[in-house]
Image (tube, grey):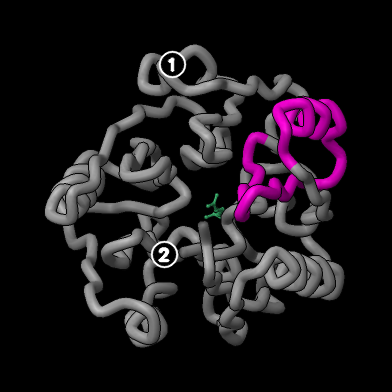
Amino acid sequence: MFRNAIVRKPAFSLKEGLTTSDLGKPDYYLASEQHKLYTETLIRLGLKVKVLPENELFPDSVFIEDIALCTQSCAVITRPGATTRRGETDGIREVLEEFYTIIEEIIYPGTLEAGDVMMAGDKFFIGISDRTNEAGAEQLTAILARYGMKGIKVPLKKLLHLKSGISCLENNTILVCGELTNRSEFAGYNIIVVDEDECYAANSLWINGTVIIPHGFPETRKKIEKAGYETIIIDVSEFRKVDGGISCLSLRF
Ligand code: CIR
């Protein structure tokens, strides 16, 4: 059950964000509209949402999920592997202090972006990617262990972040795609496999029983509904152009 979320408004510089896609540059005005609707959707699902102002210095700063991990016991400030994103953590401690008394931090030589971390109850799957290294994953695992939680490493070959290809839909159910299909790390979960051509929708977002799915992925929607979830579709096309998905746009706790 989530009660709170933190989002950051998109910066006008969003079009300079890191990307591997060939979908073109995001339109700032449309991105702002989509972000507003995203925020309203979280509110509609019962969350209290803190909206941080845009940070023009960092084009990717709208993807606030990457710079902190919010658990039931503590918050962890990350150390992004993308050097152009490292300064995004400035000021986040003060924001998190409004909600948490314990705030931990990933430090050199560790790198970790929380898009690489999937929470499933008290287990946290940690993708080892171009952005999150072994040292970062080990630091996070040690932090989690102090509070009775468990970190499990998931080496990645292709995905930008772990959660680019997987989402936890609670009720022991996960949504997976591509290189995360048939992985031993997820044995024991009910698995919904997303078709290869809808892989972007493997990043959907469970909020208190409802799953927010990106617009344009009808087969994935059908599969999630068949599994018994309410769904809400929202368009995040402008964020997709800079490799961002639905979960990347918020911290939830
Ligand atoms: C980046 O490459 O860092 C951003 N353009 C996209 C970050 C997406 N975040 C996420 O998957 N958690």
Callout 2 secondary element: helix
Q: Dot 2 corresponds to which residue?
A: 67
Where is residue 100? Give x, y as percent: 32, 77
Q: Amino acid at mark 1?
A: Arg
Q: Classify 10 Å Cα crowding around label 1: few (below 14), some (14-19), many (20 and above).
A: few
- Answer with mark 2 or mark 1, whichever residue precedes in sequence: 2
Q: Which mark is residue 183?
A: 1
Q: CA distance from mark 2 to mark 1?
A: 27 Å
Q: Is residue 33 magenta?
A: no
Closer to us: 206 or 235: 206
- Which residue is located at x 59 percent, y 53 percent? 247
Q: Quadrant of residue 118?
A: top left
Instruction: Kindly tell me whether mark 1's CB lies below 8 Å from ligand 1.
Output: no
- Which residue is located at x 22 percent, y 73 percent? 102
Q: Is residue 38 above or below residue 149?
A: below
Q: Which mark is residue 171?
A: none
- Which residue is located at x 57 percent, y 21 percent? 191
Question: In the shown orientation, is residue 114 left or right of residue 43?
Answer: left
Q: Quadrant of residue 48?
A: bottom right
Q: Is residue 215 magenta?
A: yes
Question: In the shown orientation, is residue 115 left or right of residue 37?
Answer: left
Which stretch appears magenta? 202-229
Q: Classify 10 Å Cα crowding around label 2: few (below 14), some (14-19), many (20 and above).
A: many
